[in-house]
Image: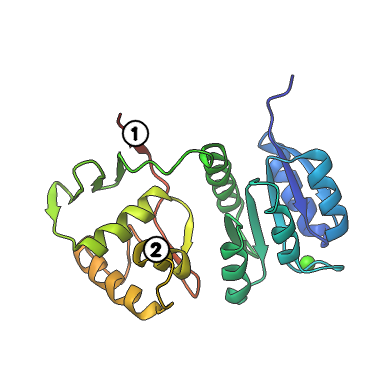
């Protein structure tokens, strides 16, 4: 029995679909392709792929429609492949349940890294986020049991809100979190969606966390979309 994972490419541009298929096959994935939305919906329900690479600009429908209909019945990881300068689309896709996005043109290693992260999160998605682990990335260590954050061995003093933001990003390491997602999870579901409060807190966190806040190492800005922390080992302690 094959243990290879199946990836469905939904893309109407043949060149791009072929390019992605070749890379994925070389990396031991089984590849299926769909050229339009209708074909995609049929293939998703009949082949149950392990991951979907989804172009938003399809000839017969908006890729957003596919995310909506798939999320009614499946948690399969979806990575949106979008054109440049369509931040609004990316945010909408992520808030509707897409796992991540890559922007055309993208590099091979970037695509493979995003796929690995999304597949790993897909496997653990059924479990509640583990809030009793230790996240490590470079000199940064976030100990969620003792609620302690250290940078190069020195303890950082974060406010309660700052700590909640950092912990949320650690728990979703490698994934981009939208402003809306962070606001809802840190301030609660009824917060008025004010990005300004998040920006102020993020600036304060970076002042404490980053040696050079202009070139952040730990918390990356995804312009117009949100923030992402590196995908690092979350050490789970029981
Ligand atoms: Ca297209």
| Residue located 68% across and 46% down the image | 74
Residue 192 position, x and y percent, is 41, 78
Q: Are marks 2 and 1 in contact (CB under 8 Å)?
A: no
Question: Which image quarter holds the C terminus?
Answer: top left
Which numbered circle lies on residue 92?
none
Pick whichever, 52 or 151, lies toward us: 52
Tell me the colour scheme of the image: rainbow
Q: Is residue 232 left or right of residue 34?
A: left
Q: Is residue 118 left or right of residue 214?
A: right
Pick whichever, 184 or 173, lies toward us: 184
Residue 112 position, x and y percent, is 59, 46
Residue 120 position, x and y percent, is 53, 39
For label 2, being within 8 Å of ligand 1 is answered no
| Residue located 76% across and 40% down the image | 48
| Residue located 70% across and 49% down the image | 52
Are there few (<14), some (14-19), or many (20+) residues within 10 Å of tag 2?
some
Which numbered circle lies on residue 220?
2
Is any atom of residue 45 visible in this view? yes
User: Residue 179, relative to residue 124: is it above or below?
Assistant: below
Where does label 1 land, which residue?
236
Are there few (<14), some (14-19), or many (20+) residues within 10 Å of tag 1?
few
Give SS at disc 2: strand
Q: Residue furthest top?
A: 1
Please tell me in which quarter of the rendered image ligand 1 is found. bottom right
Residue 101 position, x and y percent, is 59, 60
User: CA–CA distance between discs 2 and 1?
Assistant: 24 Å
Q: Quadrant of residue 198?
A: bottom left
Q: Quadrant of residue 131?
A: top left
Q: Residue furthest front?
A: 190
For label 1, being within 8 Å of ligand 1 is answered no
Q: Quadrant of residue 6?
A: top right
């Amino acid at each position: 029995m094959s243990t290879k994972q199946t990836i469905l490419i939904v893309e109407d541009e043949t060149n791009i679909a072929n390019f992605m298929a070749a890379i994925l096959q070389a990396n031991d994935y089984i590849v299926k392709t769909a050229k339009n939305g209708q074909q995609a919906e049929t293939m998703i329900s009949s082949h149950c792929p392990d991951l979907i690479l989804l172009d938003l600009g399809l000839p017969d429908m908006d890729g957003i429609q596919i995310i909506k209909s798939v999320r009614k019945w499946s948690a399969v990881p979806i990575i949106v492949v979008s054109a440049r300068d369509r931040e609004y689309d990316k945010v909408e896709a992520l808030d509707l349940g897409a796992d991540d996005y890559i922007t055309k043109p993208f590099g091979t290693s970037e695509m493979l890294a995003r796929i690995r992260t999304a597949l790993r999160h897909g496997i653990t998605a059924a479990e509640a986020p583990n809030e009793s682990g230790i996240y490590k990335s470079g000199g940064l260590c976030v100990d969620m049991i003792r609620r302690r954050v250290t940078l190069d061995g020195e303890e950082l003093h974060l406010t309660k809100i700052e700590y909640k933001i950092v912990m949320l990003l650690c728990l979703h390491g490698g994934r981009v979190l939208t402003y809306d997602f962070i606001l809802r999870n840190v301030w609660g579901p009824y917060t008025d969606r004010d990005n300004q409060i998040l920006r102020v807190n993020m600036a304060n966190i970076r002042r404490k966390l980053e040696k050079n806040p202009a070139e952040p190492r730990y918390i990356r800005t995804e312009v117009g979309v949100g923030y992402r922390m590196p995908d690092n080992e979350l050490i789970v302690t029981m």
